[in-house]
Amino acid sequence: MDNQQYLNELKQALALHSKQLRQLDVALRAARAELAELEAHTRMRRGAATEPLRNRVHALRLDRHQLAARIAACYTRILAHLQTRIDIYSECRFLGRPDSMATKLALYAQLRDLRAEARLGAWVR
């Protein structure tokens, strides 16, 4: 498997994790809204009626944190892969070659875009 294919697979995994995170966020918001509505109706008998829903909200929150950790690990692997490739093209055997400079600049652009995407993703979350 070549480097570009590996990078594309990592990006696909990242996109899948991001999609799952959005779905979990929707489910978490729905569960929180349902819990708030149920608590409003059962102020007097709070414990028994809302306990299963509280557990569901807690489980969704835990799933969300685990998925966010997987996304962070995916970003880290992609960044490490790009940085390793940049370091390889920085070696003295590649310094005089114009194609290696173009490849290195393209890798820097990918790295910059990925970091910007990671900052945007963290800001949105």
Image (cartoon, rainbow, N blue to C red):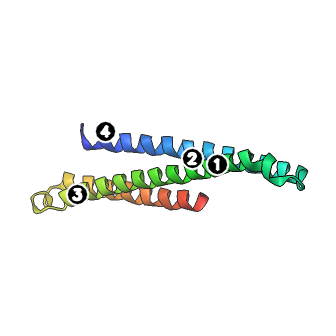
> Mark 2 or mark 4, which has the lower sequence index?
4
Q: Looking at the picture, how far across and down is residue 83, in whole percent?
A: 28, 59
Indicate the quadrant where residue 4 lies. top left
Quick check: 124 left or right of 36?
A: left
> Mark 4 or mark 1, which has the lower sequence index?
4
Q: Look at label 3 and name its amino acid.
A: Met
Q: Nearer the viewer, residue 66 or 48?
A: 48
- State which quarter of the image contains the C terminus: bottom right
Q: Secondary structure at mark 4?
A: helix
Q: CA distance from mark 4 to mark 1?
A: 30 Å
Up-down relation of residue 93 to residue 29 (above or below):
below
Mark 4 = which residue? 5
Mark 1 = which residue? 25
Q: Secondary structure at mark 2?
A: helix
Q: Nearer the viewer, residue 16 or 61?
A: 61
Q: Look at label 4 and name its amino acid.
A: Gln
Q: Looking at the picture, how far across and down is residue 123, in whole percent?
A: 58, 62
Q: CA distance from mark 2 to mark 3?
A: 37 Å
Label annotation for residue 21 = 2
Of badges 4 and 1, nearer the viewer stands 1
Q: Residue at x 34, y 45 (%)?
A: 7
